[in-house]
Image (cartoon, grey):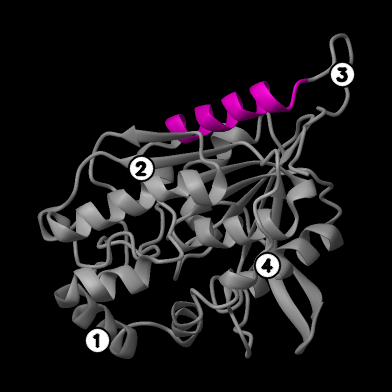
Amino acid sequence: MSSDVKLGEWGCKPGPRKLLALLFSSLLLGCASLPRPEPVVLPTPQGPQQLARLQLGQGPGPTVVMQSGLGDSHEVWADLVPLLTPRHPVFLYDRPGYGASPRLAGSRDPCTVARELHALLRQSGARPPYLLLGHSLGGLYQHAFARLYPQEVAGLILLEPTHPEHWASMQRETPGMVATVRTLRSLVFSEAMRQEFDAQADCLAELPPLVSPPPPALLMARTDWPLIEQGAFAAMVTRLWEDWRRLAAVQRVERLPGDEHYLQRRHPQAVAAAVDRLVAAHCPRPQGEPGQRRCAPGR
């Protein structure tokens, strides 16, 4: 979550940075807007679940699948989506408890969320392989998806992803921030947010190992930090970003100027360019053929 959480003011006006930078995401929504999502019913172990999804854009593939951070609906991608849809099919949705999707009881660990997304993609007719794009806690969820379904993943772009050891590291290294996060969890988080927060590290030890060769992966992150995050917290997060080279075979950590956690809002052109580069490099279109790109997913 990001310290861009602005208590008491949930609109688009800028304000001072608050405490939760990078823990998962923030509660702010983007100012741009997207079309109204389509409600669909997905069978789940707990019974039928209504989810809101959007399928936009056109192109030879792969489908760019977006996963938001803690507390965020699909609207957090509103600045980026129009830059991609002229060239790429795009899939985004609201997880249970956010946006237009009712909350779902039961476990909300990363594996459950990844399997839920996989089932929704299949039901929606979006064919693999997928280019997974995840922000903050959504990056951790996309990591779980890539480990569970590597043969269906064309690539992975992580925007300041939540590391599996993020909360445990915070408890060891930044006790002052931990106290504030616990207070916010009790007083500010919605029930859906508490479900995801509490289950953030569940199931990760059970994920299959990284395949060889792994899907291509890129991590994007800011260069600067708000004053409240400087010092031990910034050092911890920077170290954990580098560890994604081991976790997901991230080939490069690309740093973007500024201290904004929401890179898809602050730097949508840079994120769109990263999508284009990954698709061009790893999903070439056969020469002289207008059809589907041929990606080389993980094995």
Residue at the image point whose x is 80% and y is 75% from the top: 41
Please, what is the three-letter code of the amino acid marked with disc 3?
Pro
Above or below, 164 relative to 293: below
Label 1 vs label 3: CA separation? 55 Å
Could one spot residue 14 in this view of the protein?
no
Earlier in the chain: of badge 1 and badge 4, it is 4
The stretch of residues the image draws in magenta is 269-284
Of the numbered discs 1 and 3, the one sitting upstream in the chain is 1
Label of residue 221 in the image: 2
Question: Mark 1: which secondary structure?
Answer: helix
Q: Measuring from the top left, give residue 269's x and y in whole percent.
A: 45, 30
Say whether residue 114 is visible. Answer: yes
> Where residue 52 is drawn, which disc sits there?
4
- First in sequence, mark 2 or 1: give its number: 1
Frontmost residue, 299 versus 104: 299
Three-letter residue code for mark 1: Thr
Mark 3 and mark 4 residues within 8 Å of each other at the beta carbon: no
The alpha-carbon separation of the residues under discs 2 and 1 comes to 27 Å
What residue is shown with label 3?
A: 290
- What x and y, as percent, mark residue 42? 80, 74
